[in-house]
Image: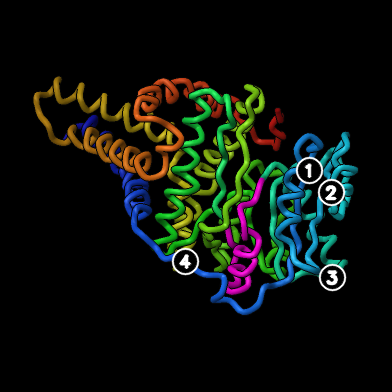
Amino acid sequence: MGLIETLYVVVLLLLAIPVMLFVLEILVSLLPYRRPSLQEHHRWPTLAVLIPAHNEHQGIAATLRSVQAQLDEGDRMIVIADNCTDATAAIARKNGAIVIERTDPEKRGKGYALDFGVRYLEQNSPPEVVIIVDADCMLQQDCLTLLAIDAMHKYRPVQGLNLVIAPAGASLKTKIAEFALVVKNQARALGYYRLGLPCQLMGTGMAFPWQLIRQADLANGHIVEDLKLGLEFASQGMAPVLCPEAVVRSLFPLNRAGLDSQRTRWEHGHLGMIIKEGPRMVVESIRNFNPATLAMTLDMMVPPLALLALIVLAMALFSGVMMMATHTTLPWNAGLVLLLMLGGAVILAWARFGRGILTLSDLAYVPVYMLEKIPLYCKFLVKRQVEWVRSQRD
């Protein structure tokens, strides 16, 4: 086997791991499962809902009303007004929240705000369960109860189903982004859930038993602090679990600046974790015989869908060129097989989870959407985003 063939096989094997895992997650997500009943549980724990907020005066009232409607007697809703320069604190107090204000321009980011909230609870009657909700989210019925019960019953971090919706009037590009996030947060997470495997933390709709969250390393400005936190819990034998019935929804920004900022933060942070932490955590999880951490790490190392599709497409095109140049099929046809596997899994995910988001004809724009994201990935190579930046709201 020549040098080109050897390199091709090595790259193909490395690429086959995330593609096959992606396909497995999608296939298993299609299987039926039994929805648990709240009546199976005898006691609902006391809880505190932490809502980190930085200049959220425009939309926080709706979130607070959504949370307030699900609180029981003795539960608390706490807004951490973090480095705010607007009316966030005043609006939160008006809507029934306990407000604690934090000002530290040097230490900015959601992690620092959450740590501030946890330290407040430590001094003020800690609850049995802490639930974290972002300041732009709406909760589906029974969301808090389901999360709290699961956290107490399983004594592990629990992640609700986090959906980000394209608002009315959104572009086709935003709808495709919604579908991509549904594939990641719903389809793939359900696949792991039905295999009895853990899930990634997603930043909002997260519940923690008090003793776990009070000991967590929260005070950092990491741009994907949720992803990092979930993997840290897994390495300690407390891997997060999904509660798919507890649904939390938010909206994509309509304005271009907010949308671009949000995508850059999510994808640069994810890619940074793959490169910086992925190989190390694979080795450590194998050495420590920690299958939950290994499963979460492998899931985390699946690149964002658009990037994965671009890489697989490039491999398939190279395979086609080499098949024509060498007049042979092996090993070149393997790249085409990977493309068919990935494409088939995406179509299945669309048929099950995406019909209400995109029409079949809308899928024709997906290749254009992928190409338009190339500058974002190139920017990661030359000037990646490493600091937390709040996305501009509408």
Query: In the rendering, at what x and y percent does residue 1 appear?
Result: 16, 36
Task: Judge from the rendering whether residue 35 lies leftward or rightward of residue 59; answer left or right.
Answer: left
Which is nearer the eye, 225 or 10? Answer: 225
Query: In the rendering, at what x and y percent does residue 136 appear?
Result: 70, 41
Q: Is residue 227 above or below residue 327?
A: below
Tag 3: amino acid: Ser
* Quarter the C terminus occupies: top right
- Per the model, the C-alpha gap separating discs 2 and 4 is 44 Å
Determine which residue is flagged by label 4.
290
Query: In the rendering, at what x and y percent does residue 78 appear?
Result: 81, 55
SS at mark 1? helix
Determine which residue is flagged by label 3.
125
Question: At x 55% / y 29%, what residue is drawn?
Answer: 380
Tag 4: amino acid: Asn
Chain-order first, disc 2 or disc 4: 2
Q: Kindly identify which numbered label has been placed on residue 61.
A: 1
Which is nearer the eye, 8 or 121? Answer: 121
Q: Kindly identify which numbered label has been placed on residue 95.
A: 2
Classify mark 4: residues with Cα within 10 Å, few (<14), some (14-19) or many (20+): some
The residues colored magenta run 138-159
Tag 2: amino acid: Asn
| Figure quadrant of residue 320 | top left
